[in-house]
């Protein structure tokens, strides 16, 4: 960051290159001034002064007040008016401006410099008492709200009351005496709520306003916005003090906001709104309904032509779409802001393509103009931006997109209602493998517990379904049957809308915008540019042929993770899986596995065929067996009810008790570190043997039909060379046996999922056998931090983020210092033992742009992510290559 001992810059002294110091607004005003555009005079207090303000405990840095006074005297000379002069008062706006755009997140005050004496002088000077008192009431209300903390609703009620007394519908119909009364009522409200008079000293007004704008950097809304957009908290905001120009002087005056291209569609056409006889906040705050910017051409054609010319000049100068604010004062145009425009993902891509065609930027620059994460918007339904949205609850934004429908509390009802053509939202305390058919049927999922990498989140993301998890305002009465949301009853059939991108929940059905069914041509072209620049391969995590086909359609060139346990969750085979688990003899277990073999073979045939010509990495069974059985708590309730209703001699009771006994036997204090991953395959080798046989029978059958099937076998959770040796030898023996039986050659590799710190340390020894590594960063993060991800994300991680103990949720953004260092160690030692070892990542981090950049940095070969995040990873990989 540019540093300076100078804390105030006039617009003539600044430039567009000083964004870090002057903020986006100050830098834009300075650049327009240097370009000779019509900009009111002013100055900017730097972001460094804001940082110093916070460092001194909320006190203006020593000497800054005097520097502001000097700057105001210089501004008086340029404006030809005096600050506080009753006859010809200089009024100013005090505006926030961070180095990146944070629209509406911080505060602004207009018309500062008015007091009881100056308003009379302004009325006489302009010959327009209504304008003078309108300006004064605006200033008093904004100052009362922003500086003195008076509730906006109470202030608005005074204006509403004035309209009611006069019997008019709009503000322009109120006269000077009406506004005089509004000012008096507002000052009385200030007196009652603060115990003090409204400040008449204009220098005190200015100092208090500067402090308030600095304070707004740490307002709740600004903090939340920064957290969502990953903007550092220590940047601070600049404060621009600008001589006022007035759009509320009559019908030859007005104010507007415009974009040089449509920020929603990218269309190369001026887009914006204009409001006659108004000030800026009337447009931004929606106080009055503005007209399209094109109306300005009809009303004031010369002003419109000048504005169009300036808009084109600014876009060409900045080589990007600009967001412009302007005011017309008695037929004269003034530019108040230019900044790079916020835009939708679609608009960002289309504009980048067009700017390249127009010769303004290169292809390489175009790839940097689109936020990779924003591409998520394109593949999920989203709430219509014109809809009125009032969230009643929030949770973790576990899977992006929006969905609306009727509430159901169990998967069977979800399936039944969906079959009847109803849109449903599956609402659960938390989901289990038993719920997968309900997730498939539902439009979206809402859970009271669980994190962004919970079962519900992972399954929903893979299916492209929205999910809000860990919603603390949701209380699901699993046994009482009474469910509440935000303190109000929630019944089956009630309608909800969820936004998995933001993690919000709304009552009722909001209008949604559907995503495209396939990659639109404009996005395909843009991603092809990205593919030309990237080194990293982009693969996908997929558990069904449908997922695999979608991933391939979106540009994946391999499957980095196929979770076989999700195949076991399907309703038709779950009973067979449960019989296998409940079997008390090897023979009974073998019989159940024989029944599962054809299911698995067909699963793998579908996956391998969908990705013909590309590798498919199939992870052998990973979770503990108890996850496929009913929960211990539910079984205790059910057996108690059966004992009381049918008695202990009833066959249904005895069968249920048998299941309970097995669940108790499998119950572990810490199942995440218990009998799961490769440990499961070592204790029950017949399970892994069945899966490997199914993989290679499927591959042999496909290859005999001319399909280029390329299976790779991934053994999960290996932590010692001995575990690697045991499972590698067992898998290889079965694979080679099947290939020999079928007499069909199949190339394959056996590797491991690196998800334990110890595996990273002994990676060199593991690589003596393992033919590839894939970092499972979900579990590697858990075991590195010692966090249970579902519990952590639902309980203390939000508090850790709030208190800045964590800068990011480590389950969503890869922790480079801890987890990343272990990954680097694993890469270095693994490739030292086996040069050219293929290494990728298959945790959910594979679709996070910052994590993709890190994977590129440490030399991984590919990233693997959910199918709908493949375009994100393609662009992020290109951006990493050019960084």
Image (cartoon, rainbow, N blue to C red):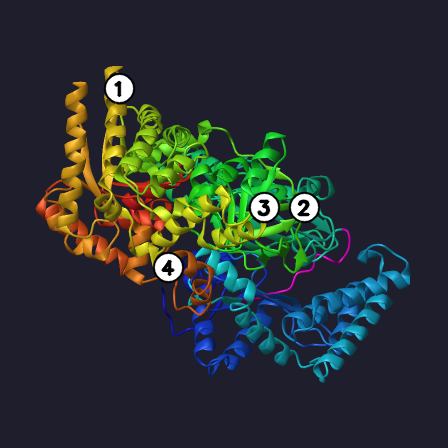
Residue 122 forms part of the magenta stretch: no
- Out of 635 and 5, give the one closest to the viewer: 635
Mark seen at residue 317: none
Q: Which residue is mark 3?
A: 409
Q: Are marks 4 and 2 in contact (CB under 8 Å)?
A: no
- The magenta-colored residue range is 240-251
Seen in the image, is 13 located left or right of residue 665?
A: right
Q: CA distance from mark 1 to mark 4?
A: 41 Å
Q: Earlier in the sequence, mark 3 or mark 4?
A: 3
- Out of 701 and 774, give the one closest to the viewer: 701
Seen in the image, is 704 located left or right of residue 93?
A: left
Q: CA distance from mark 4 to mark 2?
A: 33 Å
Circle 1 crowding by C-alpha within 10 Å: few under 14, some 14–19, many from 20? some
Mark seen at residue 701: 1
Point 67% across, 70% down: residue: 145
Residue 245 forms part of the magenta stretch: yes
Q: Earlier in the sequence, mark 1 or mark 2?
A: 2
Mark seen at residue 494: 2
Give the overall secondary structure of the magenta segment: loop
Please tell me whether residue 797 is drawn above or below residue 828 in the rendered image: below
Q: Earlier in the sequence, mark 1 or mark 4?
A: 1
Circle 4 crowding by C-alpha within 10 Å: few under 14, some 14–19, many from 20? some
Point 51% across, 31% down: residue: 516
Q: Secondary structure at mark 3?
A: loop
Please tell me whether residue 44 is drawn above or below residue 685 in the rendered image: below
- Out of 877 and 174, give the one closest to the viewer: 877
On the image, which quarter does residue 295 sit in?
A: top right
Q: CA distance from mark 3 to mark 2?
A: 11 Å
Q: Position of residue 815 (x, y in %)?
A: 31, 58
Please tell me whether residue 798 is drawn above or below residue 266 in the rendered image: below
Q: Earlier in the sequence, mark 3 or mark 2?
A: 3
């Amino acid at each position: 960051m540019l540093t300076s001992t100078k804390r105030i810059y006039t617009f003539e002294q600044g430039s567009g290159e000083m964004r870090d110091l002057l903020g986006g607004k100050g830098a834009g005003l300075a650049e327009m001034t240097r370009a000779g555009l019509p900009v009111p005079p002013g100055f900017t207090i730097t972001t460094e002064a804001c940082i110093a303000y916070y460092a001194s405990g909320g006190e203006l840095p020593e000497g800054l007040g005097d520097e502001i006074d000097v700057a105001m005297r210089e501004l008086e000379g340029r404006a030809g008016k005096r600050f506080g002069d009753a006859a010809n008062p200089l009024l100013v706006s005090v505006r926030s401006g961070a180095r990146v755009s944070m629209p509406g997140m911080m505060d602004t005050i207009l018309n500062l410099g008015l007091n009881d004496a100056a308003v009379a002088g302004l009325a006489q000077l302009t010959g327009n008492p209504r304008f003078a008192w309108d300006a004064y009431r605006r200033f008093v209300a904004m100052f009362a709200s922003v500086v003195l903390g008076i509730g906006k609703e109470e202030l608005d009620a005074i204006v509403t009351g004035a309209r009611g007394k006069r019997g008019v519908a709009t503000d322009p119909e109120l006269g000077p005496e009406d506004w005089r009364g509004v000012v008096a009522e507002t000052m009385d409200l200030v007196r009652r709520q603060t115990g003090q008079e409204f400040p008449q000293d204009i220098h005190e007004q200015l100092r208090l306003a500067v402090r308030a704008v600095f304070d707004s950097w740490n307002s709740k809304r600004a903090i939340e916005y920064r957290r969502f957009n990953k903007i550092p908290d220590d940047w601070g905001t600049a404060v621009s003090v600008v001589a006022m120009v007035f759009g509320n002087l009559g019908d030859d005056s007005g104010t507007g906001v415009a974009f040089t291209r449509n920020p929603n569609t990218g269309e190369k056409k001026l887009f914006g709104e204009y409001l006659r006889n108004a000030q800026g906040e009337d447009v931004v705050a929606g106080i009055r309904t503005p007209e399209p910017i094109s109306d300005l051409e009809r009303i004031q054609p010369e002003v419109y032509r000048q504005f169009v010319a300036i808009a084109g000049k600014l876009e060409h100068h900045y080589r990007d779409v600009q967001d412009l604010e302007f005011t017309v004062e008695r037929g004269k145009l003034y530019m108040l802001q230019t900044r790079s425009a916020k835009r939708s993902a679609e608009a960002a891509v289309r504009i980048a393509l067009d700017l390249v065609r127009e010769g303004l930027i290169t292809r390489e620059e175009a790839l940097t103009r689109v936020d990779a994460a924003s591409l998520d918007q394109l593949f999920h339904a989203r709430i219509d931006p014109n809809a009125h949205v009032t969230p009643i609850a929030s949770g973790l934004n576990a899977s992006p997109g929006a969905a609306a429908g009727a509430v159901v509390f169990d998967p069977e009802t979800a399936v039944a209602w969906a079959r009847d053509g109803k849109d449903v939202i599956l609402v659960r305390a938390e989901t289990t493998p038993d719920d997968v058919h309900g997730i498939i049927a539902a439009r979206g999922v809402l859970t009271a517990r669980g994190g962004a990498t919970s079962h519900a989140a992972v399954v929903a993301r893979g299916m492209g379904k929205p999910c809000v998890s860990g919603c603390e305002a949701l209380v699901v009465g699993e046994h009482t049957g009474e469910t509440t949301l935000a303190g109000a009853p929630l019944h089956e059939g009630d309608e909800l809308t969820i936004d998995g991108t933001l993690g919000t929940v709304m009552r009722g059905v909001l209008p949604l915008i559907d995503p495209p069914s396939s990659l639109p041509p404009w996005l395909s072209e843009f991603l092809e540019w990205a593919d030309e620049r990237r080194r990293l391969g982009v693969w996908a995590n997929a558990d069904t042929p449908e997922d695999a086909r979608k991933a391939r359609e979106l540009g994946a060139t391999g499957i980095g993770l196929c979770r076989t346990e999700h195949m076991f969750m399907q309703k038709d085979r779950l009973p067979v899986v449960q019989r296998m688990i409940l079997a008390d003899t090897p023979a009974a277990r073998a019989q159940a596995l024989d029944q599962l073999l054809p299911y698995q073979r067909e699963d793998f045939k579908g996956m391998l065929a969908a990705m013909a010509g590309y590798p498919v990495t199939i992870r052998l069974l990973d979770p503990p067996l108890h996850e496929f059985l009913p929960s211990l708590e539910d079984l205790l309730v059910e057996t108690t009810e059966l004992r009381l209703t049918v008695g202990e001699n009833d066959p249904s009771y005895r069968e249920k008790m048998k299941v309970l006994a097995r669940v108790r036997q499998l119950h572990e204090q810490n199942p995440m570190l218990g009998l799961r991953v490769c440990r499961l395959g070592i204790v029950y080798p017949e399970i892994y043997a069945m899966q490997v046989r199914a993989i290679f029978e499927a591959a042999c059958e496909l290859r005999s039909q001319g399909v280029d099937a390329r299976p790779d076998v991934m053994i999960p959770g290996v932590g010692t060379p001995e575990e690697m040796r045991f499972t590698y030898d067992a898998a290889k023996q079965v694979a080679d046996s099947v290939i020999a039986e079928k007499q069909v050659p199949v190339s394959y590799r056996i590797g491991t999922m690196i998800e334990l710190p110890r595996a990273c340390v002994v990676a060199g020894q593991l690589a003596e056998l393992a033919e590839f590594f894939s970092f499972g960063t979900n579990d590697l993060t858990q075991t590195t931090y010692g966090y249970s991800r579902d519990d952590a994300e639902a309980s203390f991680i939000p508090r850790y983020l709030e208190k800045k103990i964590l800068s990011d949720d480590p389950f969503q953004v890869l922790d480079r210092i801890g987890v990343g260092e272990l990954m680097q160690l694993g890469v270095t030692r693994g490739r030292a033992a086996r040069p050219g070892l293929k290494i990728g990542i298959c945790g959910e981090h594979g679709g996070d742009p910052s994590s993709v950049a890190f994977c590129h940095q440490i030399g991984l070969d590919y990233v693997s992510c959910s199918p709908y995040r493949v375009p994100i990873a393609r662009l992020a990989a290109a951006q990493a290559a050019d960084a």
